[in-house]
Amino acid sequence: MQRTKKNDWSPLPHSDEDRERAKSVPDTPQTRAPTYRLAWDDEEFMTRRELRPVRLQLELLKPDMVLAERGIESTVILFGGARIPEPGGEAWAAKNEVQKKNLLANAKYYDEAREFARLCSQHSASYGYREFVVVTGGGPGVMEAGNRGATDVDAPSIGLNIVLPHEQAPNPYVTPELCFNFHYFAIRKMHFVMRAKAVAVFPGGFGTMDEFFETLTLIQTGRMERVPVICFGKSFWERAVDLDFLAEQGTISPGDQDIIDFVDTAQEAWDVIARFYEIDGGK
């Protein structure tokens, strides 16, 4: 038997071989019946409600295998709003003049996300793009800026897209071979943090808040190793999330706020990471 991968030999037929054999059987009422399809090659069967545990496992396994085969060991996450435009672009998500004004003002974070991703990717090059690889949600706005910053220096970057009613096609800067699509938010969020060496959070909405607070919870409860969590735009986050108020109320512990570093520029953010990991050049 021929095998396409090293150490892939087995005296038993592989599933890809049996799938091809199944296509060559005589066309009869029996072979046309849905029950005759190989179970794992039967799309209708695989999407049944009862198969959810299997789909959850597959959605966890597929990206993990691809990233491992690529040799990617650690990542830098960029969370942030899909609605934030590129400077000079259109505030397409604005529903009124106030939103338009604010979205255009927040366009500066597109540039900072792009520059931050560029800095991370330049450092990643010294590891053969195995460490500090940029990962985003793969969509527009801040996510696009992150993947674009990696592309600016010819570095690979990861996009973890998800099927949504109104969004979202992958942005054109994600490395095609590292572009994934998810059905389950929970599994997608696991893949964000599984390899994270740093988390950068830019202004955003409910999705960004969800990802941000899940990361904080994992670190606060000791379910995740402490890594730099860097919020871009102190003035934005002071109004969006009043952590001092939570500490005063006793709903978080004094000092829990110290999990987060606030910055305004890409260089400040990279300096936080460099200090944390004692990388040469960290200020």
Image (cartoon, rainbow, N blue to C red):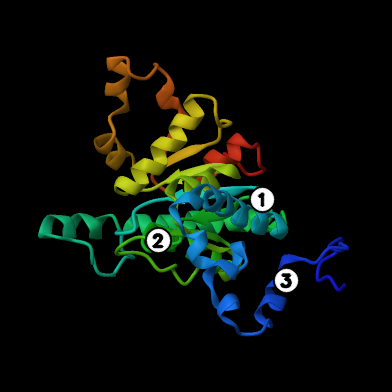
Say above or below: 9 vs 172.
Answer: above
User: Which residue is found at the position 66% from the left and 41% from the top?
Assistant: 279
**Looking at the picture, how far across and down is residue 88, in whole percent?**
29, 69
Q: Which residue is mark 2?
A: 163
Question: Dot 3: few (<14), some (14–19), or many (≥20) neighbours within 10 Å?
Answer: few
Rounded to the nearest angstrom, the CA distance separating label 3 from label 1 is 38 Å
Which residue is identified by label 3? 18
Q: Left of 234 or right of it: where is 43?
A: right
Residue 131: image tag: 1
**Circle 2 crowding by C-alpha within 10 Å: few under 14, some 14–19, many from 20:** few
Please name which of the two marks, 3 or 2, marks the residue nearer to the observer.
Answer: 3
Q: Amino acid at mark 1?
A: Glu
The reply, left or right, for residue 91 in relation to residue 263 is left
Determine the secondary structure under disc 3. helix
Q: Is residue 250 above or below residue 38?
A: above
Q: Amino acid at mark 3?
A: Asp
Q: Quadrant of residue 141?
A: bottom left
Q: What is the quadrant of the N terminus in the image?
A: bottom right
Label 1 crowd bin: few (<14), some (14–19), many (20+), radius 10 Å: many
Q: Earlier in the sequence, mark 3 or mark 2?
A: 3
- For the point 47% across and 50% down, the residue is 50
